[in-house]
Image (cartoon, grey):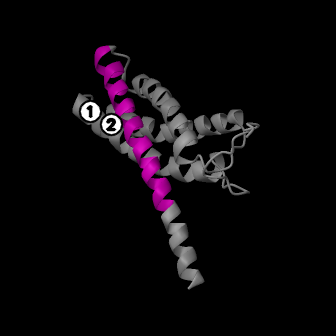
Amino acid sequence: MRFLKSLYQRFAALVHELTKFGTIGAVAFVIDTGLYNLFLLVVDLGPLTSKVYATVISASFAYAGNRFWTFRHREQSGLGREYFLFFLLNGIALLFGVLVIGFTTYTLKLNDPVSLNIANIIGVGLGTLFRFWSYKKWVFLEATTPIPAELPEAGIRQDR
C-alpha cells in the first residue's frame, strides 16, 4: 500500500506542476506569438530577429510566473543563479525555434505569414519540452526541506 500511496503522491505533484507550467506557458505563448507577429509584420524586423525579441520578452514573463507560482515550492537557490540559468536554457530552447524558422525561410523558401507562424509553433513546441525538463533539473531545484504552505508571521507579537 505504501508503494501505491507514494506513486500517487509523486504523480499528483507532477500533474500539478505540469498544469501550472502549461498555464504559464500558454500565456507566454500568446505573448511570444503576438510579439513575433508584431515585430515580423508591423515593425518588419525579419523572421529571426522578430523571434529573438519576442522570446526574450515572453521568457521574462515565464520566469516570473514559473518562479513565483509553478515552482514556488521548490528550493530557491538565488535569484541571480536562477535567472542566469533560466535564460541560458531559454537561449538553448530558442535555438529550436530559430532553426525551424530558419529552415522554413531559407531552405524551404516559405516566407508567408502562415508558414512562418506554423514554423514558430513547431519551434515553440520543441523548445517547451526541453524547457520543462531543464527547469526541473537545473533551475527550480527540489526542496531539501519542506517549505510551509503558509509563511509564519515574522516577528509579530500580539499582546493580550
Q: Residue at x 54, y 75 (%)?
A: 7
Q: How many marks?
A: 2
Residue at mark 1 = 110
Q: Determine the residue located farthest toward the top in the rendered image.
A: 43
Q: Position of residue 91 (x, y in %)?
A: 55, 36
Q: Amino acid at mark 2?
A: Thr
Determine the main secondary structure of the stretch shown in magenta.
helix
Is the residue under label 1 in contact with that under label 2 (CB below 8 Å)? yes
Q: Position of residue 17 (x, y in %)?
A: 50, 54
Indicate the secondary structure of the residue bearing disc 1: loop
Q: Quadrant where the C terminus lies?
A: top right
In the picture, the disc for residue 46 is: none
| Residue 92 seen | no
Horizontal side of 72 relative to 104 (left or right) equals right
Magenta span has 104?
Answer: no
Q: Residue at x 52, y 47 (%)?
A: 70
Q: Residue at x 38, y 37 (%)?
A: 27
Q: Position of residue 11 (x, y in %)?
A: 50, 67
In the picture, the disc for residue 104 is: 2
Mark 2 or mark 1: name the one nearer the start of the chain: 2
| Residues drawn in magenta | 14-42
Image quadrant assignment for residue 54: top left
Q: Quadrant where the N terminus lies?
A: bottom right
Nearer to me, 72 or 141 = 72
Indicate the secondary structure of the residue bearing disc 2: helix
Q: Residue at x 54, y 36 (%)?
A: 63
Q: Residues within 10 Å of mark 2 (few under 14, many from 20)?
A: some
Nearer to me, 13 or 45 = 13
| Residue 41 seen | yes
Horizontal side of 51 relative to 135 (left or right) equals left
